Image (cartoon, rainbow, N blue to C red):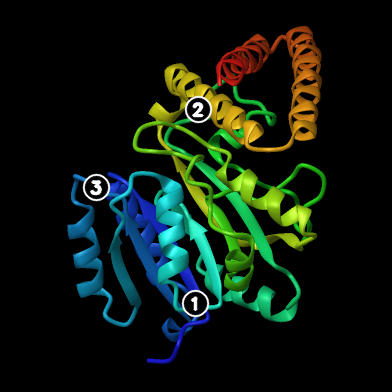
Amino acid sequence: MSKPLLSVVVCTFNRDNYLQQCLNHLAQQTALAELFEILVIDNQSTDQTRQVCDDFRTNHPEVQFRYLLEQQQGLSHCRNKGIEASNAEIISYIDDDALADSDYVSNLITYFQHIPDVDAIGGKVTPIYQSQPPVWMSKYLLPLVAALDMGVSSKPFTGRKFPIGANMAFQRSVLLEIGAFSTDLGRVGNYLGSSEEKDMFYRMKKLQKKVHYVPNVHVFHSIPDDRLEVGYIKKMAHGIGKSEAIRTRQGSPMMAINKWLEELLKIGATVVLAILYTLKGEWPKAKMLVKFRFWFLGSFIKG
């Protein structure tokens, strides 16, 4: 079989029920099977992940598929293993609970071929809620469910905007040049760390790499009810705060100053938004914005 143009990397840890749906959607792509491969990087799952992968390989012999075990715990370790194992010049990452649109692969490959100087892209991510969005959800907290929608037109990411890990893709050569995902950042087991994606894209930005938003590279992201419980959001806020503290410490003194200025601005913006939501009678939205900022700052200051 010919060398694929794209490696779709799915990192997973004890999510066998979601992984099966994720793989099934990837098997139903409109693109020819010879154009892409699927790499599942298993971070030592203790559920039926291996069986799900074995069954998928049996049921879809036409798909170029590989199962790889990553023994070092952590999402960044898994993503880096995907870089090492890839046989393609384009590497994409989707979450194990993400469902790729049927044209995901074809649209992704087409964009890189038509815009050859683009170094990375981030696609549209639409959340699929198990029940209903919580009353406290506002557009300012949508990143907590990995949602991304910047409109119907392709465009460069500007300012502090960057792709979301549930749907991002890179030229392999750029990843080899920039360096791997930071293993000091990101999720590890049940610890909800983050910032490894931000770190990667900020490094790319410093080197003036081109990163584009491409809406027709689209995935749907499954959001179970327990991910929207206040306890989970608090745990996530603590993980983000600690990760940002680590990322800031690893940077220059000027980076630390800029980060503190950024946080002061966010505190001010949170207060203003909370007041506006309260005046509009949307107290749950105001309350959660304030709580999240409080939880984040507590972990960020503690480091």
Mark 3 residue type: Ser
- Mark 2 and 3 residues: CB-CB less than 8 Å, in contact? no
Name the residue located 68 percent from the left edge and 81 percent from the top edge: 113
On screen, residue 26 versus residue 147, left or right, reads: left
Q: Nearer the viewer, residue 124 or 300?
A: 300
Helix, strand or loop at mark 2: helix
Name the residue located 74 percent from the left edge and 22 percent from the top edge: 263
Residue ID for mark 3: 45
Q: Residues within 10 Å of mark 3 (few under 14, many from 20)?
A: some
Q: Nearer the viewer, mark 2 or mark 1?
A: 2
Mark 1 residue type: Thr
Residue 123, quarter of picture: bottom right
Residue ID for mark 2: 239
Whole-percent x and y of residue 295?
57, 15
Which is more N-terminal, label 1 or label 2? 1
Residue ID for mark 1: 30
Which is more N-terminal, label 3 or label 1? 1
Mark 2 residue type: Gly
Name the residue located 66 percent from the left edge and 26 percent from the top edge: 138
Residue 195, quarter of picture: top right
Residue 281 against residue 262 in the figure, above or below = above
Q: Residue furthest bottom?
A: 1
Residue 66 against residue 294 in the figure, above or below = below
Q: Nearer the viewer, residue 168 or 256?
A: 256
Helix, strand or loop at mark 3: loop
Looking at the rendered image, the quarter that the N terminus falls into is bottom left
CA gap, disc 2 and disc 3: 21 Å
Residue 98 against residue 178 in the figure, above or below = above
Name the residue located 56 percent from the left edge and 44 percent from the top edge: 196
Whole-percent x and y of residue 271?
77, 11
Whole-percent x and y of residue 58?
20, 74
- Mark 1 and 3 residues: CB-CB less than 8 Å, in contact? no
